[in-house]
Amino acid sequence: MTMKSPDAHECSDDSMNPHITKSLPSSVAISHDVSDGNINGACKELVAHLGFDCVVSDGDILRSRSSTPWSPAPPSQYPAKVVTPRTTADVSEIMKICSRRRVPVTAFSGGTSFYGALSATRRGICIDFKLMDQVLAIHEHDLDVVVQPAVEWQDLNARLEPLGMFFPPDPGAGARIGGMIAMSCSGTNAYRHGTMRDWVTSMTVVLADGSTVKTRQRPRKSSAGYDLSSLLVGSEGTLGLVTEAVLKITSLPQNQHVGLAAFLTTRAAVSTAISLITSGLPIDALELLDPYSLGAINHSGLSSRQWEEKPTLFLRFSGSSQAVQEQIQMAREAAATRGCEMFETSGNRQEIDVIWGARKQVGPSLVSMKQDPTDVFMSADAAVPISALADMIDWAHSIIKEAGLIGSTLGHVGDGNYHTAIICRKAEEVKAWSVIESIQRRAIQLEGTITGEHGIGLKLRDMLVEEVGDNGVNMMKAIKTALDPHCLLNPDKVFRIEPDV
């Protein structure tokens, strides 16, 4: 018996997304079978291959693998079962069974993504990679590591620190390598070191039919055929499942210092950031927190320090003692000419952890501002050319205020990527999402992007066509159907596979 998942239409609200992307060509048959009989039959096969403990039906686990406080999903979008493989061969066997039975599959590693990327819109099976959390090899002299998908980036760096090495991409706490690759994440280090895409050398990937592909070997460069690694980074689990990755690493920054520069206005802070960027000053990181963000940190209690709630630049420096002092002096002078009210720096490790730790706690701090469990957290993750950044942030603040909402605009100003976050009552969700869409659409008008590091998921599918055009989206669809003709892997993400879903 072939059937569609119940209530699949709940994965989107077309009143919020008027620009509907074209569905896949009519010749592609989307025929998933998520009937109880088929799911139970698949589970019997999976238990035979993996063991009873590796197939999970607990309701709380099903919910947590598709719905989070920052990216909620309704019960109709929870998976029917969760499966926990240990090896690439296990994942291959899971996909062979699901391919033969036409069971859709989602994947889970850290669960920190946004925009409904985890939701099981057609139920099916979720592959939870939690047992595949090993650092398989560290090649210190080759400056690379081999890891499984459930390795946390913080844990990896804890392993590398005694060797004087580190892995630069630093998204939110708890993010794991598989999800970081899927979403092409970055973080505060991206200004100096680039994004996840720049640090992935190769991957072992299981495709929708269960076949296994190694995208390339371990050299730092290769021009052998299509760049399959780059194709898969940022594909949001729609093209293949990463079971192993070779990642580049580099030397730890030396003589680290951090700085804070507080201003009376956001424009003054952004203007200072732009002057530092265009000067060519080799700062490690350049971040902006607005008053609402700092207020959220104070409210949450996640920082041991109370923060003055003013637009503040967070800066990080490294290098020789002389180089760091020169960087700090240039930053101090640039800030002073724009009315900086407070400038402080520190090279003390504990103080560095407190200051930079506050920046890394912004996400959970904003979520803590919910006054009711039904309140909604939503965010924009746009990026624009840096010359447009000050106007863009001022404009974002103004339309949030005009809508009668409260929100923050913060982010990685060093590379033009800013995050607008709004916490609102459930009754204000449509209005708040309209503001978010306006901010993203404005970024496109300024030759920017709707998402710098969080991905498309469900929520941004229809705006993707505004950024890359019909032909761009259709090219993505052609790649999807070539690798996953039955649309089993993370269906409905990035673009619509059916017009009403």
Image (cartoon, rainbow, N blue to C red):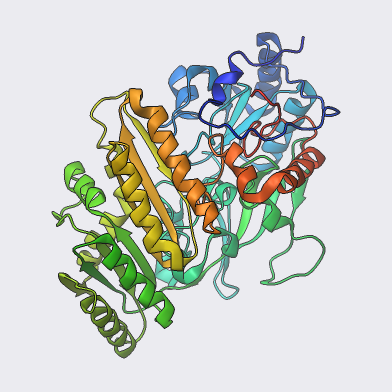
Q: Nearer the viewer, residue 137 or 462?
A: 462
Q: Residue at x 68, y 47 (%)?
A: 469
Residue 454 in view: yes
Q: Position of residue 136 (x, y in %)?
A: 58, 55
**Residue shown at the point (30%, 87%) measured from the top left:** 326
Point out residue 149 in the picture as x, y percentages from the top left corner. 57, 47
Q: In this view, does 383 lie to the left or right of 203?
A: left
The image quarter containing residue 198 is bottom right
Q: Where is 386 relative to 298, above or below?
A: below
Farthest bottom residue? 322
**Residue closer to the observer: 347 or 166:** 347
Q: In this view, does 139 lie to the left or right of 369?
A: right
Q: Which of 255 and 384 is in front in this view?
A: 384
Say left or right for 103 vs 425.
Answer: right
Left or right of 118 on screen, residue 29: right
Residue 311 occupies which quadrant of the picture?
bottom left
Which residue corresponds to the image point at 53% horizontal and 33% vertical from the top-left?
118
